[in-house]
Image (cartoon, rainbow, N blue to C red):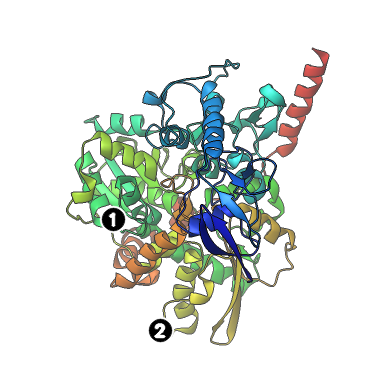
Amino acid sequence: MAKVKLTIDGREIEAEQGSTVLEAARQAGIDIPTLCYHPAVGPSGACRVCVVEVERAKTLVASCVYPVAEGLVVKTNSARVRNARKTVVELLISTHPQDCLCCDRNGRCELQALANRLGIRTERFRAQKPQREPDASSVSIYRDQNKCVLCGRCVTMCRDIQGVGAISFAYRGQRTLISPSFEHGVGEVECVNCGQCTKVCPVGAIVEKDETGAVWDALDNPGLTVVVQVAPAVRAALGEEFGMAPGTSVTGKLVRALHMLGFDAVFDTQFSADLTIMEEGHEFLSRLKSGGKLPLLTSCSPGWIKYCETFHPEFLDNISTCKSPQQMMGAVIKSYYAKAKGLKPENIFSVSVMPCTAKKYEARRPEMRASGVQDVDAVLTTRELAKMIRMAGIDFANLEDDDFDSPLGESSGAGTIFGVTGGVMEAALRSVYEIVTKKPLADLEFTQVRGFEGVREAEIAMGSTRVKVAIVHGLGNAGRFLAGLRPGDSPYHFVEVMACPGGCIMGGGQPLSLEQDVAEKRASVLYQEDRNKAVRKSHENIAVRRLYDEFLGKPGSELAHKLLHTTYGERARARVEEARRQAVIGAAGA
């Protein structure tokens, strides 16, 4: 791409034509503060915190949307710029709650950081705005509109990137707010619980629903056996909460911390990821041979499942009946593990640590009671686990490594890569290929399904059988992909869909980050751990084989179906729309 030369703060630099002043400045090591801009959602120019002075321009301009040009002269730190930024932030603070000490984002709040950076030490303005009750209607997400700074990041993420549109701007002027339609609770509309909004909110206006209290209570209850499972993506990101660089693996430290918190057993969700491959691989081959519904769509992402139920129910028969690894592990803990330990399922408190807020919703689905009681009792995000570790005074960065507990702590490299987009497909292909061809793979790494393009395709030769696969991540991409398919008439055999852009490593419950390449760094952890594993194929996991030999029988057995499979149904959007219509009629009558 062509380059242009411009001057920023007296330095002549080169930048790519089509880039913005903000991008050019940051490439040159000049940090311009931002608020509405986030690398995951892109520029909007709404907040004006990033204003700069451009020679011959009549007004200050928003650097996040102002394009570079040949000969452009920019000042990022003039008195005029500093005063404008300071005033913008002071006005935001003027209506913001003064509850920083007990706010979830205290110490990590972008508004707080801006006030500190810009030297705001006194409250110059104070304005009143109507106070609203926090929205606790969702099992996954908690909203406090009183803290909202109207940056619009959450709206862009939900509407434009995820293609859901559960929240939007409402009203105008001083009455402007961000809300679901007709000010319903977010749990009452078509929110899919993905939590991507919580990752981009700069303040504490949208956060995950906290379950740390319930877990502490369980740990303090001597009548309960409290066990925990940990998803692959958690170990690729938890270190960031304790000052470690993105891309740092903390698997051993994570296990040690969980033992120190008091859990009776620490299990690895990678075990049930391998179990998922056994069941899903069997299901895929069965459909392939018997002429069942294809393409088979993966089912391990609960945000994607709810999205399909709500917006594309015509594809529900294509979704695998396999539960997610979280729910498979929950069912196995309260059946196989309970039997082995002589425990009653109701006396086991099963916790999962997930990168995903939708897992909170999934654990409470009525279908997820294969053991007769709720299979997973509490779901912590990566961020919530970090809170608990800090509360316990654990020096995480300096912990010694520890090992997962048997029998549900053993896993293959295939289970590890579940946490990154394409990983479920690659794990499945490693096993399905060898089952079909009855030959060992020469190269275990299916690099053709890796990457971060929104939709990727590959065709895999398995002897005389050719399998066409697709990988889709991000619900906006999923919607566009499904719009191009017709049920029963698809060129694909197998499709992996993940709700979150980047897969689980970028889940709604992961550490907050403004880094452009954080997804690549987190993914590198999982790929490296896969390479370091002695066993790299799910069907070679000895512990999973033992589970079948001692308990389940074989993949697809009657007991396996009872514990590890489920079905989903269309969500009644018509009832939601009718409720909205009645609300409008009622408001008009009033």
Amino acid on which the number 2 mark rests in the picture = Pro
Which residue is outermost to the left?
400
11 or 288: nearer the viewer: 11
The answer to whether any part of residue 138 appears in the image is: no
The image's mark for residue 134 is: none
**Residue 364 on image: x %, y %:** 48, 38
Vertical comparison of 122 with 240: above or below: above
Pointer 1 residue: 250
Pointer 2 residue: 440
**Residue 470 on image: x %, y %:** 60, 68
Amino acid on which the number 1 mark rests in the picture = Val
Q: Earlier in the sequence, mark 2 or mark 1?
A: 1
Q: Residue at x 60, y 48 (%)?
A: 63
Locate the C terminus and report the quarter of the image it occupies: top right
**Residue 385 on image: x %, y %:** 33, 41
- Say if mark 2 contacts mark 1, CB within 8 Å: no
76 or 528: nearer the viewer: 76
